[in-house]
Image (spheres, rainbow, N blue to C red):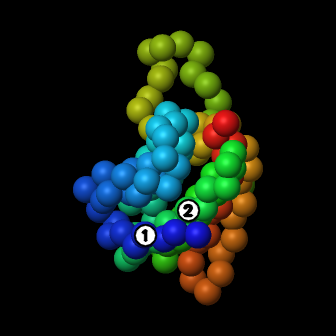
Amino acid sequence: MNSISLQPELLELQRLNKFILNNLKKENLKVDLIVEEVFVNILNHSNADFVKVNVEFEEPTLTIEFIDNGIEFNPILKENPKPPATIEETTVGGLGILLTKKMADELDYKYVNGENHLKIIKNVE
């Protein structure tokens, strides 16, 4: 398993994407979107002082674990938003967790010693 420690800053997203790509060895749009959604949610909502990401790739399975010391939040329990009835009712934001749930093959969450641990498993055949 490989790990990277990041500051909770948007500029770190580029470093994180490069780290994921180096471990995966090939681009995957769904993985990129999942990583971006989770990382940005941590930045915007957790008040974390740090973010650590563990990655393990055993073909065809990619496992990514996000660890942060922010506010306890289990995204798996978050209720899915209702889709807007019309395009005019559409708002920006609020769909990142839903997209992550739909694109990941498996999600696991636990809160241990003041840290959020979100594990994402994705088959990347």
**Hey, what amino acid is under mark 2?**
Val
Residue density around tag 2, few if under 14, some if 14–19, many if 20 or more, within 10 Å = some
Residues at discs 1 and 2 in contact (Cβ within 8 Å): yes
Q: Amino acid at mark 1?
A: Ile
What residue is shown at x 36% (from left), y 69% (from top)?
6
Left or right position of 3 against 13: right
Q: Find residue 102 and report its horizontal and vertical position in percent.
A: 67, 36
The residue wearing badge 1 is: 4
Q: Position of residue 114 (x, y in %)?
A: 57, 83
Q: Which residue is mark 2?
A: 55
Marks 1 and 2 sit apart, C-alpha to C-alpha, by: 9 Å
Say if 122 sits above or below 1 in the image.
above
Quadrant assignment for the N terminus:
bottom right
- Which residue is more in the foreground, 119 or 124? 124
- Give the residue drawn at x 49%, y 41%: 26
Residue 37 visible in the picture: no
Kind of element beneath mark 2: strand
The quadrant of the picture occupied by the C terminus is: top right
